[in-house]
Amino acid sequence: MAHALAMALASKSVLRLLQVRMNDQSFFSPTQGLRQVRDQLVSWKLLDPEAAYDRWEKDFDLQVSSVSIAARNARAGILEYLEDTFCNLVVLATYPNKALASWLDVSVHRSLLRQGRMMSLFLRDGQRGFINPDSGGLKLTKILVPVTHGVDSVPAIRRIQAMLTMVDIRAELKLLHIGKKAPELIDENGAPFDMPIMVREGAPVEMILATAGMLEANVIAMPTAGQHGLIDAVRGSTTAQIVDDARWPVLAVPVG
């Protein structure tokens, strides 16, 4: 919630809150989501505790909607919602133990990576992110972007750059290739892409995580290509394994 709200504030975007409930659960009031937004803005000292729900639209040019839908599990509910509602960015929390909320079906992030065409930001519940919890300020200084042969990562890099522009943040993108020789990236004009690529050898997941630690990256951004490249490393997506580690927020960015 805090990350989605902070980014929506910075970019003056529409914040859509989605609550997925079990089919047999009673209707959940959407005003609860609005109260959570107000409480967060109050904690950041941006709103008075008695402020009306529409105050943030007047003061911050922020629009908030809250929707509750019934589904057999979170994965089905999220994908059903996204079929009819386009979002520039989907923000989800992941959990280290299925027992915390077994009905949520924590494999939701794997399904979104395979089926979704929107950027998806995965954050481990209770772990570090890139906002100041006391003020809501965004802190993004370095983003690690793994690239590989056979996947045109330039569109994904452009999408990351566009997102940074929207939230008015200048972060350094660090490209990384795991292998012997870096791919030759070509930009949209057919020219060589002018950005250096670090090359490391080793197991992809371990080397990506180790490099993120060495660089003190705030986010790992993974270009994904549907059922090819990084997204479908056969019997275990590299992106999904990075998400499961949870030491860094992970941004999955479709290349298409």
Image (cartoon, rainbow, N blue to C red):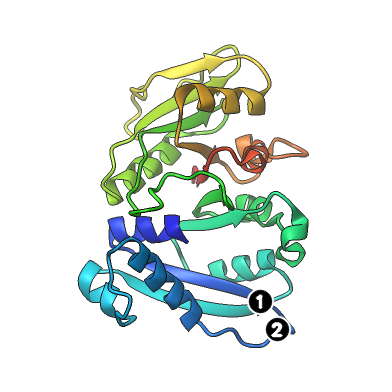
Is disc 1 placed on a helix, strand or loop?
A: strand
Up-down: is 150 above or below 25? above
The residue positioned 43% from the left and 77% from the top of the image is 34
Asked if the residues shown at circle 2 and circle 1 are in contact, with their CB atoms under 8 angstroms apart, the answer is yes
Q: Residues within 10 Å of mark 2 (few under 14, many from 20)?
A: few
In the orientation shown, which residue stands out farthest toward the left? 59
Q: Position of residue 250 (x, y in %)?
A: 53, 42
Up-down: is 121 above or below 59? above
The residue positioned 37% from the left and 63% from the top of the image is 43
The residue that disc 1 covers is: 21
Is disc 2 placed on a helix, strand or loop?
A: loop
Residue type for callout 1: Arg
Q: Position of residue 81 (x, y in %)?
A: 56, 71
CA gap between label 2 and label 1 equals: 6 Å
Q: Residues within 10 Å of mark 1 (few under 14, many from 20)?
A: many
Query: What is the number of the mark on residue 25?
Result: 2
Residue type for callout 2: Gln
The residue positioned 46% from the left and 28% from the top of the image is 216
